[in-house]
Amino acid sequence: MAAAAPTTGPATPHIPVLIDPLIAAVSPVAGIWLDGTFGAGGYARRLLDAGAARVIGVDRDPDALALAGPLAAEYGERLRLIEGWFSALDVLAGTPLDGVVLDLGVSSMQLDQPDRGFSFQKDGPLDMRMSGTGPTAADLVNGSSEAVLADYIYHYGEERAARRIARAIVARRPFGRTLQLAEVVSSCLPRPKPGQIHPATRTFQGLRIAVNDEFGELIAGLAAAERALRPGGKLAVVTFHSLEDRVVKRFLLARSGHSARPSRHAPESVPGEAQFRLISRRAIAPTDAEVARNPRARSAKLRVAERTAAPSVPVDRAAMGLPGPKDWWREPA
C-alpha cells in the first residue's frame, strides 16, 4: 500500500520544539550539519540561518520531502534532501559532519493527516508507517497474538491496562480504521477527566513504535551519528516521551565515560575512552512560555553532546534499556 499523497501542508503551522535552546547549546553553528528527521524543515532552516554552510536533510517519509520544494528553492545548494533512514546517516551523508540533529517520534504533519493513520481523533486507515512501506498497524493488530499485542502496548505505550485492551482487540478484530480501534481501546478505560490524555494515547503510541521499529532505529541512529561526527561535532536529540529519553540518556552517559546500567542491580561498567562530552548533564526542558505557544512541546527534552577524537565502538544494546520484545512480524505461528 502506497503512502498517502502529500497535502498542501500540515493543518497547523510547524513549530520546531526546543529550537532556541538547541541553537544556543550547539553554537557557534558552522560547517556541514545533518537533520536526520527533516519533517517540515524547521530545524534545518534555523541551522542554516544560524550559520551552517550546508544542511543534509534526511527523512524516511517521502511526503515530507515532497513538501520541501519551497525550502529547497530558498536555500539552493546549501540544503540537500535525501529519502532514507537516519540509522544510516553516516552512509547517506558521505562526509564527516559538524553536527547531527534528531527530532524523534511522530511529526506534526503526520498527526495532522488522517490518511497516515497516526491519529486516534481523526478517522483514517490503520497505517502508522512513517516510510509508507512494510507492514501496517492493521497488520500488527489483526495478525499478532494477544500476548504480543499486550507486550507492545505495555512496554512501548506504558499502558497499565495493556492486557485488558489486547483482549478486547483480539475479540473485536479485524480492524481497518483508526477511530474503530480508538473506540474499542477507549471502552476498556475510564472516561478521562478534564485535562487528562485521550484513553487511546498510550495504545496508539505503543503500536506506532512497534510498526516503525523506533527503538531499533534510534540505537542505530545514535551509533551512526557517533561514526559520522568529526571531533568537536555536536549531537542534539529531542525526545517526546520517557522511553526515548531513557535510551538517549543511557547512550550518552555510556559514551561520555559514565555508567549506563539497565538497573541499579546490574554491575557498573568500567569507564573507557569517551566518545562524547556532555554539554548539558541534565536534559533541557521547554519553558512555560514555549509550552503555551506550542502545547506539543510539553513533554519534550533536549540532550546535547560534543564528539571527542576517540574511535567509535559498537553499541551494547542490552545496556541501553530497550523496552519490550522485538520483531512482532516474525512471531512464530
Image (cartoon, rainbow, N blue to C red):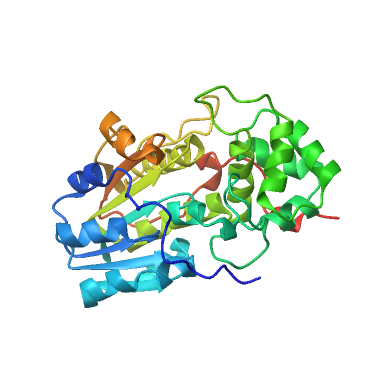
Q: Position of residue 312 (x, y in %)?
A: 37, 56
Relative depth, front residue between 58 and 168 = 168
Q: Residue at x 58, y 68 (%)?
A: 3
Does residue 284 show up?
Answer: no
Q: Residue at x 43, y 54 (%)?
A: 11
Relative depth, front residue between 192 and 2 = 192
Q: Position of residue 302 (x, y in %)?
A: 33, 41
Relative depth, front residue between 321 and 55 = 55
Q: How many marks?
A: 0
User: Which quadrant of the view contains residue 24?
Assistant: top left
Q: Position of residue 1 (x, y in %)?
A: 66, 70
Q: Residue at x 63, y 50 (%)?
A: 210
Q: Position of residue 17 (x, y in %)?
A: 33, 45
Q: In the rendered image of this protein, does residue 243 appear above or below residue 106?
A: above
User: Which quadrant of the view contains residue 206?
Assistant: top right
Q: Residue at x 32, y 33 (%)?
A: 292
In screen coordinates, is 204 left or right of 141? left
Does residue 148 show up?
Answer: yes
| Image quarter (top left, top right, bottom left or bottom right) of the C terminus | bottom right
In screen coordinates, is 217 left or right of 54? right
Q: In the rendered image of this protein, does residue 168 appear above or below residue 32?
A: above
Q: Which residue ends up furthest to the top in the rendered image? A: 193
